[in-house]
Amino acid sequence: MADLAELDATALAQALAGKRVSAVEALKAVLSRHEQTHATLNAVVAVDLERALDRARAIDDHRAKGDALGPLAGVPMTVKDTFDVAGMAASSGLAELRRRQVEDADAVARARQAGAVIWGKTNVPVMAADWQSANPLYGAARNPWDPARTPGGSSGGAAAALAARVTPIEIGSDIGGSLRVPASFCGVFAHKPTWGMVSQRGHVPPAPGSFAERDLNVVGPMARSARDLRLLLSVIEGAPWRPGRPAPTSPRPASRSGSMNRCSRSIRKFGTPCCVWPASSAPLARAWSRSQARSTPTSCSAPTRRCWARFWARTCRPVWSGRWSSPDRWPNWPCAAGRARCPLQR
C-alpha cells in the first residue's frame, strides 16, 4: 500500500477492516513518522509504546478470529496532554501533575472502546491557557509548515502532529479557540461541538479528579479530513447529560436562592464567562461594583452591575488568583453579554 501515514482515519480503518494492513503495521508507520519529525516539531511529548504495541497485536488477533470490532479498531492516535490516559497522566505542561495514577478520561475511554490504539500525548501550553503551545516541562511545539512559527494553541501539538502525518486523528478541547486556532494555523480540521455533547471528565483543567463540566469549554475531534471529524465525534460523543435532555437532579447549594438560580441560568443562557473570579471573591466583587458605579455610564445600570457582582461572589470559584490586579481591569461582563437589565429584576 501507499505510505500508511498519509491515509486519513477513515481510509485507514477501511484498510484495516479489509485486512489489507495490520494494526501493528499502521502503528509502526506513524511511530516512524514521529521519529523523523520529533526533533523539529516537538509535537508528541509523551509516549507509551509497549502498551500501544500490545494493544495493536491484540486487535490483530481479534480480527484474525473474526471477532466484532469497533469503528476505530487498529487506528493509531494521539491525545492532547490535558486528558488523563491510563499510564500517561495529563500534565497540562506542569511536572507536578505528570506523576499520578489515573484512568482514561471519558472521551479517551470511548475512543479506546471503539478500538483506537492510543500511543502518545501532544504538547500544550501551561494549563491550556494560550494560543501557542510551549511550557517549561516539554518546551515549545513548532509549526510543520514553518518551524520558526507556532502551531497555535492550546491544541497546538495536536494540530502539528496531524499536519505532519504523525497521527490521523486527535482528541482536543476548546474554550476560546483551542481547537479552531491551531487547525487554522496548521491547515487541518477541527470541530467545536455543542457544550455538553462530549464529556469533559478527566480533562485538566479543572483540578485533577474534578467532576465539573467547565462553562464554555468543550471536548472535540481534530483530523485531516471532514469525514474523520464525523467519525471521531460519533465515537466520543456522550456525556452525563446533553442539551435537550433532562439534566440529572442534585441538591442545590444552600447559599443559592431561587432568584440567584434564575440569574445563574440567565448568565449561562447568554454565554457569560464563569469560573474566572480571583480569590477572596466577595470583597473584590464589592470593590468591582463600587468602581463600576463611579465609572462612565454604560448600557448597564448600577443595580445591574451590583447584581452580577453578587452572582460572581456567590457562585464562582477562584482559578487564577490575582488574574486582575485592580478593579479597573476587570471586564464588564453584563455589558459584554448585552443585558440591559439584571435578570433578578425581571
Image (cartoon, grey):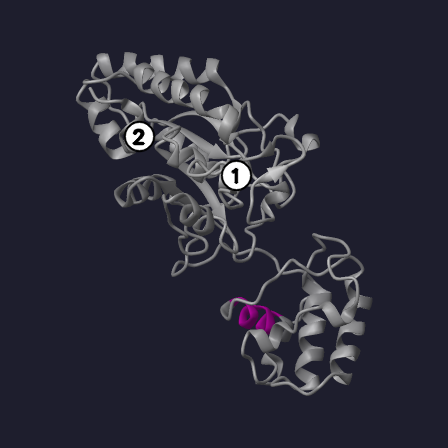
Is residue 21 visible in the rendered image? The answer is yes
Viewer-nearest of discs 1 and 2: 1
Whether residue 274 sits left or right of residue 226 in the image: it is right
Where does the magenta region start and end? 261-268
Crowding near the residue tagged with mark 1, few <14, some 14–19, many ≥20 C-alpha atoms within 10 Å: few
Quarter of image, res 296? bottom right
Choose between 151 and 81: the one closer to the eye: 151
Residue 48, label in figure: none
Residue 16, percent from left and from top: 23, 22
Residue for badge 2 = 72
Q: Residue at x 41, y 59 (%)?
A: 243
Q: Which residue in the protein does label 1 denote?
A: 148
Amino acid type at circle 1 is Ala
What residue is shown at x 50% (from left), y 41% (from top)? 156
Q: Is residue 262 magenta?
A: yes
Q: In which quadrant will I find the C terminus?
A: bottom right
Spot occupied by residue 330 in the image (x, y as percentages of width and height): 71, 68
Q: Tell me residue 248's x, y (percent).
A: 49, 54
**What is the C-alpha distance between the residues marked 1 and 2?**
34 Å
Q: Which of marks 1 and 2 is nearer the N terminus?
A: 2
Q: Dot 2, crowdedness within 10 Å: few (<14), some or many (≥20)?
A: many
